[in-house]
Image (cartoon, rainbow, N blue to C red):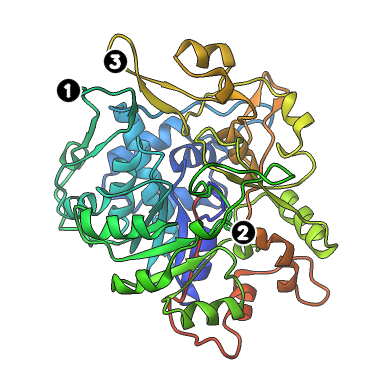
Amino acid sequence: MGAGVSSWRLARAVSKLGQLGVVSGTALDQILARRLQDGDPGGNIRRSLDQFPFPEMAERIWKTYFICGGKDEKAAYQAVPMQTKDGSREAKELCIVANFVEVFLAKEGHDNPVGINYLEKIQMPHLPSIYGAMLACVGYVLMGAGVPLKIPGVLDRFAKHEPASYTLQVAGAQEGDDTIMTFVPREFMERDLPALPRPKFLAIIASNTLATTMVKKANGRVDGFIIEGPTAGGHNAPPRGKLQLDAEGEAIYGERDKVDLAKIRELGLPFWLAGGYGTAAGLRSALAEGAAGIQVGTAFAFCEESGLKDEFKYALLEKAKAGQARVVTDTVASPTGFPFKVARLEGTISEPEVYAARARICDLGYLREAYRTEAGAIDYRCSAEPVSIYVSKGGKQENTVGRKCLCNALMATIGQPQVRAGKHTEIGVVTSGNDLTEVARFLRPGKSSYTAADVLAELLQSGAPAEPRLIKTAAEV
């Protein structure tokens, strides 16, 4: 869906109705800081911080970022510390608190579980983020966009407030280089706490090989899989084999990219199907294949409770009603190198001429690549940063062509655009699955919007058993 689109409001709405609401765990430190600088509308963050187990940490975050009444709309948001391998204490505390707040608010007012979704590729915030979510008793952790073999073990250790480590992928790393990130909960705890519930872990996969690898080599219990096809929104797994493009420049997926569900069933773990299953018929089809249910993103991304900026939400709903909605798989937009789904919409980075007017800036850095310098240290680069700077760090100039700053664009998409020099405002990007063309079916007669309850009523219509947690909201970017 995109950072902040599957927010606590949407996840809470879905979980209250008996399915599994999943919040996006991407860039929550940035989102929390900007919500506070917007004045904490509704007092939701303050209410959450009052329940945070470490009040001194909570108060530091509040005093650093909260602006009573909100910042001036032409003022820039205060920068938050960029993530690095070792990270400052301030950066880690912000991750802990932000993840706690998002999960706490999603769980508020009901007793059903809530999940959180992370991208394995965004590795540097993993450990403090997961610990923060677990402090709020998150029920599920989902992770894709990589091979999260070590996450199950992290969950096991954090449940006992024990230190956990995670290896940072560093381009050019050599034997003996220190690439290990370690988080020690007791360095942040202000008092002793009882053991935390260990959330279930669901790996997001796009191949049988990865599923088998997770079962055989993960350092802890894997509780199931989300099997995501290339029609799903956000980042997609690249096609297997040599990349081939169609006449419109989109990646071509073939038979090799289809997951063999018979082999998945042999693994004996529950699985949910994602990408093109967001209909009652899709749910019945998934259940017939032995799935535990489906994961749905696009339908929920355009409902009233999602964090998507209303301007974008309603413009794309109108396009869908008129049969003019279009989603493309951009093979070069993302600095990660993964194909990225983009909805065509005027005034967003889907328009080349609009994005071309933006200066190349990388000041959020979630999609940066860690690399080994000639001196043996670890530094960071992004193919969407200024070309000369990227090349000076050893990056290849050809890798910069078409790359876009998704980090700043995704903040703008949820109504938190950075303002530069009092006049230059970042523009957004809407990521969506191919099902965008069909979302108008959730609109009731005479209505210009729909709710999460409308989506569930459609998906769980007669013929699809209304069992709990058949449906998960998608939250991956």
Give the left or right position of residue 250, taking residue 202 as reference: right
Would you say residue 192 is visible in this rendering? yes
Label 1 close to label 3 by CB (< 8 Å)? no
- Report the Cα–Cα distance between label 1 and label 3: 12 Å
Identify the mark nearer the N-term, 3 or 2: 2
Residue at point 14% right, 46% down?
Answer: 162
Foreground pick, 397 / 370: 397
Residues 382 and 108: in front is 382
Q: Nearer the viewer, mark 3 or mark 2?
A: 3
Residue to which mark 3 is pinned? 377
The furthest residue to the bottom: 462
Q: Is residue 81 visible?
A: no
Picture residue at 62% right of the left edge, 46% below the top: 251
Q: Foreground residue, 15 or 382?
A: 382
Which tag, 1 or 2, sits closer to the chain's start?
1
Tag 1 residue: 176
Q: Which element carries disc 2, helix, strand or loop?
A: helix
The residues tagged by marks 1 and 2 sit, at their Cα atoms, a distance apart of: 45 Å
Amino acid type of the residue that numbered disc 1 sits on in the rendered structure:
Gly
- In this rendering, the answer to whether 114 lies above or below 286 is above
Q: Which mark lies nearer to you, 1 or 2?
A: 1
Percent of width and height locating residue 29? 43, 39
Which disc, if any, is residue 301?
2
Distance CA(mark 3)–CA(mark 2):
41 Å
